[in-house]
Amino acid sequence: MFTFKVDDMTCGHCVASITKAIQELDRQATIAADIQSHVVQIASAANSEVIEAAIRDAGYTPQALD
């Protein structure tokens, strides 16, 4: 599982955008986002660098916490 702090994730639309970007990489990924703490946890077969790049490409600035 990978954990990212995404300070610019502030609403449900942000969560949906990040979820879509990750699921385009891995349809089987499990994503849990907490808007209040700005934390996204992802269980995926993709590696963390690829996931981080997908979040950035969606317009957000993730910081790996792992």
Image: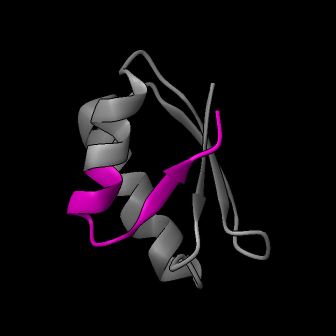
> Residue 55: image x %, image y %?
34, 55
62 on left or right of 56: right
Residue displayed at 37% across by 44% down: 52
Seen at 21% across and 60% down, the residue is 57
Quadrant holding the C terminus? top right
As drawn, which residue projects farthest toward the left? 57
Residue 33 position by quadrant? bottom right
Residues in magenta, as a range? 54-66
Residue 35 left/right relative to 58: right
Q: Is residue 55 magenta?
A: yes
Give the total number of marks visible in the rendering: 0
Q: Is residue 18 above or below residue 41?
A: below
Outermost residue, right direction? 36
Answer above or below: position of 33 versus 60.
above
Give the answer, above or below, for where 8 lies relative to 31.
Answer: below
Give the percent coordinates (x, y) of residue 27: 35, 30
The residue that appears at 52% across and 68% down in the rendered structure is 15
Where in the figure is residue 28, as x and y percent of width and height?
Answer: 44, 24
Quarter-wise, where is residue 11 in the image? bottom right
Q: How is the image coloured?
A: one colour
x then y, percent, for residue 64:
54, 44
The answer to whether residue 25 is left or right of residue 15 is left
- Quarter of the view holding residue 7: bottom right
In this picture, residue 37 sits left or right of residue 19: right
* Residue under the point 26% across and 34% down: 25
The quarter in which the N terminus is drawn is top right
